[in-house]
Image (tube, helix red, strand yellow):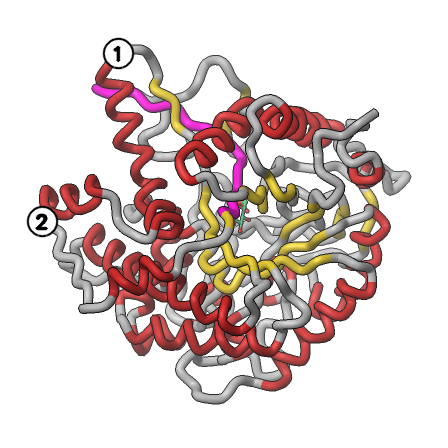
């Protein structure tokens, strides 16, 4: 059977350093923002503590100990047939505080070894430069990205690693899910995206959008420098794509939906078109937001547009104007969509939404798209025999891949690759739990940090192996 996916289609899996490496203070690594976040759950928010406090449990400190077990794990990825593997570089392994002039050689060496191990199996490393793990020192001393100085710190870090790995890594992304912080009323998002802790009297919106401007400038500078370091680099942005549907054909629902979608386009427009949309400038004015730009910033944005769009897709959302009771839904402004199911964490499962999203993005920007996260966080049971029969995960992924196939085959969208999130079980970003599992590989570890850390193949392991082997023709 002929495949809709090109012969070079990048099948793989994705993770982020802080969610699996552990070794939070080994070989010169500094404290990162992920290291001061305690474990929470669906109903309990993760706490952001003032430094690492005794008596608190910080699940990212150990992760799944990928730091010492990566060879074993990469061998399993290779067995599944991965063509690519997405991870991030922990900024605080390279510049422990973030403002040093010289990098930490031990940190650089770790990623050299990690990339060599991937390349040994012809697995292409796909690298995120900043995935919710900036050095905590930058938060305390500088206020995170609310401070313009962080642009230079980030550029120095990015330039250092891009030079070091210029012959090992071709695909890079700058800031993971940069648009999460549009939800600035939830502390976790501005903290993880930009290292922002709010103070009494802060205009949250202004603080966040100022930091976002700094990140967009930093990203554009890194794109330009990266292309100078190696013209073959492909450098992307990374967007959390939760497409929104108007709840009804009431024009007010439709218009509200249009406006809410701008909370995604705001970022992607700058990354992809090199300028803020007119609606953004009108919005600053309307809301009285004073976003400070320096002379030359607009030129930098123009010169640093991305080569591709990396995106995560987990769910869609429905939006309703004049809302009185939205019911119990996971995200602010959303209302339960009666046509679709949801996960145990309230995430609305919508495979068609993936095709819809890919079309939205491609129509707007005509840039190659890379699905760098998609997946189903669920509670897995390990049977006495050791088996984990995660057919619900297979179902989720299968239905999403079918829609991806349609986007390529029927709609002509240019998609470079597909990487399910958390291809090996890891610490949840949102809740800090271990029990919200996404992997093809089960890791024996629980929410309290107990367990042997042994790895087991789930049913989905063999399934994904044949998906890759057949280039998506056998699902
Ligand atoms: C994305 C992040 O938000 O979704 C990942 O880029 C995260 O870091 C993933 O883990 C799934 O979210 P969660 O909260 O289920 O871990």
Residue 250, disc:
1
- Label 2 residue SS: loop
User: Residue at the spot x=82%, y=60% of the render?
Assistant: 121
Q: Is residue 361 visible?
A: yes
Q: Is residue 256 above or below residue 97?
A: above
Q: Which residue is mark 2?
A: 288
Picture quadrant where residue 245 is located: top left
In this rendering, the answer to whether 321 lies above or below 232 is: above
Relative to 449, is 399 above or below?
Answer: above
Residue at 82% across, 53% down: 78
Any magenta on residue 311? yes
Residue 55 position in % (x across, y down)? 51, 67
Q: Picture coordinates of residue 74 (x, y %)?
A: 78, 59
> In this figure, what is the number of numbered marks?
2
The quarter holding residue 209 reads bottom left
The structure residue drawn at horizontal position 59% and vertical position 67%, both measured from the top left corner, is 61
Where are the magenta residues, as a range?
Answer: 309-324
């Amino acid at each position: 059977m002929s495949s809709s996916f090109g012969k070079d289609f990048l099948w793989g899996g994705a993770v982020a350093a802080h969610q699996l490496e552990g070794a939070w203070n080994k070989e010169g690594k500094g404290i990162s923002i992920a290291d001061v976040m305690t474990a929470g759950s669906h109903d309990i928010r993760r706490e952001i503590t003032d430094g690492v406090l005794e008596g608190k449990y910080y699940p990212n400190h150990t992760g799944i100990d990928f730091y010492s077990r990566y060879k074993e794990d990469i061998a399993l990825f290779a067995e599944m047939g991965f063509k690519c593997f997405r991870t991030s570089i922990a900024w605080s392994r390279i510049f422990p505080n973030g403002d040093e002039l010289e990098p930490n050689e031990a940190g650089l060496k770790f990623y050299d070894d990690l990339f060599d191990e991937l390349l040994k199996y012809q697995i292409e490393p796909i690298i995120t430069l900043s995935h919710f793990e900036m050095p905590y020192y930058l938060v305390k001393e500088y206020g995170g990205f609310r401070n313009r100085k962080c642009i230079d710190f980030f550029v120095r870090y990015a330039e250092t690693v891009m030079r070091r790995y210029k012959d090992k890594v071709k695909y890079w992304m700058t800031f993971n899910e940069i648009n999460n912080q549009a939800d600035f009323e939830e502390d976790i998002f501005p903290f993880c995206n930009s290292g922002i802790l709010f103070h009494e009297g802060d205009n949250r919106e202004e603080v966040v959008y100022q930091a976002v401007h700094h990140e967009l400038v930093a990203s554009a500078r890194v794109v330009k420098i990266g292309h100078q370091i190696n013209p073959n680099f492909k450098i992307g942005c990374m967007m959390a794509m939760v497409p929104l549907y108007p709840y009804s054909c009431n024009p007010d629902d439709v218009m509200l939906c249009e406006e809410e979608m701008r909370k995604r386009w705001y970022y992607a427009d700058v990354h992809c078109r090199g300028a803020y949309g007119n609606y953004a400038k009108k919005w600053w004015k309307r809301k009285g937001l004073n976003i400070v730009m320096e002379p030359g910033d607009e030129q930098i944005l123009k010169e640093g547009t991305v080569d591709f769009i990396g995106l995560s897709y987990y769910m869609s959302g429905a939006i309703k104007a004049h809302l009185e009771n939205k019911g119990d839904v996971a995200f602010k402004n959303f209302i339960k969509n009666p046509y679709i199911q949801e996960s145990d964490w309230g995430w609305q499962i919508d495979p068609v939404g993936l095709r819809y999203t890919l079309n939205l993005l491609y129509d707007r920007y005509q840039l190659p798209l890379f699905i760098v996260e998609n997946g189903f966080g669920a509670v897995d049971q390990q049977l006495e025999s050791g088996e984990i029969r995660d057919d619900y995960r297979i179902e989720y992924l299968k239905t999403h891949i079918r829609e991806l196939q349609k986007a390529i085959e029927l709609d002509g969208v240019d998609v470079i690759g597909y990487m399910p999130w958390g291809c090996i079980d890891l610490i949840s970003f949102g809740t800090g739990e271990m029990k919200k599992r996404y992997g093809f590989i089960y890791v024996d570890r629980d929410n309290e940090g107990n367990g042997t850390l042994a790895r087991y193949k789930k049913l989905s392991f063999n399934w994904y192996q044949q998906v890759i082997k057949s280039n998506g023709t056998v699902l």
